């Protein structure tokens, strides 16, 4: 019997921190060459955001992972699953997703307690950067799956691929963009509780990427920021999502729109009579929306109609993603 987050869970009598060997920042994983991550240096953009781990045989590792997973509550696993889904979540976003009941104070306390436990157990890591800076306190922490967390939740590294990834600290621009995509997911989950729709699928990158095979043999990878399917009554509304921060120049925007047009012509999504997903651009303001709409207006009508824009306003986003007017 083990107590996790104030509740008793049957089946396995163990302490999570004892199972994980109390993974700390002082412990580093050993690479195949026998060198530690500190000796190898900072990883590349394909690595995970892990901070620590220990070297062990594959058999011992699998056994430990099974023990740790059996000690976790359903909410623990749901939190790890959501971090896997979107790659990064702030402490406040985790609170909104998984601690919706109770007073604001109790929600924050329970969320902090669970996140601290998952972090101290080596399943989640905190990035050095915080939302709101160092003065934001624990509510500003940004979390990702550690190498151990990836094994427990059975996921590849946050940047994709088939193997676990070594540590790296992403750039501020990268973190801000990923958190914006995460915010779209969090808002949809919040709205799902009170509205008459269901999130059938939500895939962030790289899970949402598609290989497009064009006529003539050429191919490329379509890289939306997210792919979402909403169940609305008897219908499904399907969308690619592009979260735009207003930093890309017009030629880059044109190339992105052209990639979706090429995917449309290649029939990437139009199997069994399905329509091509709407491409929803979430932009910071109306000026940026006008810029994108002007670019789309230069396309043939059947192509320009693939795209729709919405600002960061939560209700406007929801209406657009449900297939209404922006």
Image (cartoon, grey):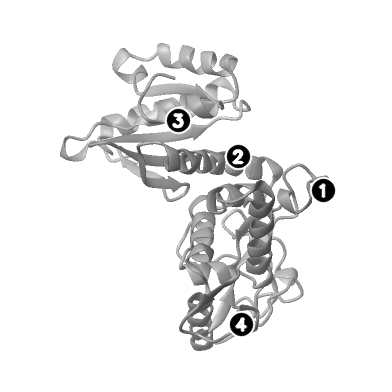
Please say whether residue 153 is visible from this viewpoint.
yes
- First reached walking from the N terminus: tag 3 or tag 2: 2
Q: Tell me the mark number nearer the camera, choosing from 3 and 2.
A: 3
Q: Secondary structure at mark 4?
A: loop
Q: Nearer the viewer, residue 89 or 59?
A: 89
Task: Sort mark 3 into few (<14), some (14-19) or many (20+) by Cα contacts within 10 Å.
Answer: some
State the separation of the CA atoms marked 3 and 2.
19 Å
State the separation of the CA atoms marked 4 and 2.
36 Å
Q: Tell me the mark number nearer the camera, choosing from 4 and 2.
A: 4
Q: Nearer the viewer, residue 136 or 257?
A: 136
Q: Secondary structure at mark 3?
A: helix
State the separation of the CA atoms marked 1 and 3.
32 Å
Residue position marked by numbered label 2 in the rendering: 177
Task: Sort mark 4 into few (<14), some (14-19) or many (20+) by Cα contacts within 10 Å.
Answer: some
Residue 163 image position (x, y, % from top left): 49, 67
Kindly indicate the quadrant of the structure image that contains residue 210.
top left
Residue position marked by numbered label 1 in the rendering: 134
- First reached walking from the N terminus: tag 4 or tag 2: 4
Residue 89 image position (x, y, % from top left): 60, 50
Residue at image position (66%, 81%) is 34
Residue 242 image position (x, y, % from top left): 48, 33
Residue position marked by numbered label 4 in the rendering: 15
- First reached walking from the N terminus: tag 2 or tag 1: 1
Decide: marks 4, 1 in contact (CB < 8 A)? no
Task: Sort mark 1 into few (<14), some (14-19) or many (20+) by Cα contacts within 10 Å.
Answer: few
Q: Tell me the mark number nearer the camera, choosing from 1 and 3.
A: 3
Residue position marked by numbered label 3 in the rendering: 318
Q: Is residue 225 above or below residue 293?
A: below
Q: Is residue 297 left or right of residue 1?
A: left
Q: Which residue in the rendered view is the most extreme toward the front?
A: 103
Q: Is residue 110 left or right of residue 211?
A: right
């Amino acid at each position: 019997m083990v107590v996790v987050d104030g509740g008793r869970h049957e089946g396995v009598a163990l302490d999570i921190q004892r199972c994980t060997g109390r993974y700390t920042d002082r412990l580093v994983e050993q690479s195949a060459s026998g060198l530690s991550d500190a000796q190898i240096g900072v990883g590349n953009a394909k690595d995970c955001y892990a901070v620590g781990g220990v070297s062990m045989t594959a058999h011992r590792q699998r056994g430990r992972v099974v023990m740790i997973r059996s000690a976790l509550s359903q909410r623990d696993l749901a939190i790890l699953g959501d971090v896997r889904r979107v790659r990064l979540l702030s402490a406040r976003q985790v609170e909104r997703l998984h601690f919706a009941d109770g007073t604001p104070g109790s929600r924050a306390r329970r969320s902090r307690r669970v996140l601290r436990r998952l972090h101290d157990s080596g399943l989640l890591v905190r990035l050095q950067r915080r939302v709101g800076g160092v003065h934001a306190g624990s509510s500003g922490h940004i979390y990702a799956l550690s190498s151990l967390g990836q094994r427990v939740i059975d996921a590849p590294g946050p940047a994709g691929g088939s193997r676990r990834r070594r540590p790296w600290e992403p750039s501020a621009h990268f973190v801000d963009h990923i958190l914006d995509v995460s915010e779209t997911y969090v808002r949809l989950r919040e709205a799902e509780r009170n509205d008459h729709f269901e999130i059938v699928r939500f895939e962030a990158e790289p899970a949402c990427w598609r290989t497009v095979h064009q006529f003539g043999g050429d191919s490329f990878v379509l890289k939306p920021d997210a792919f979402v399917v909403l169940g609305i009554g008897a219908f499904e509304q399907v969308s690619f999502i592009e979260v735009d921060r207003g930093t890309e120049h017009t030629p880059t925007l044109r190339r992105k729109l052209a990639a979706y047009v090429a995917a449309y012509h290649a029939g990437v999504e139009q199997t069994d009579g399905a329509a091509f997903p709407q491409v929803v651009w979430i932009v910071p303001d109306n000026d940026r929306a006008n810029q994108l709409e002007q670019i789309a207006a230069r396309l043939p009508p059947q192509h320009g109609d693939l795209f729709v824009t919405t600002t960061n306003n939560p209700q406007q986003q929801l209406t657009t993603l449900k297939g209404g007017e922006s």
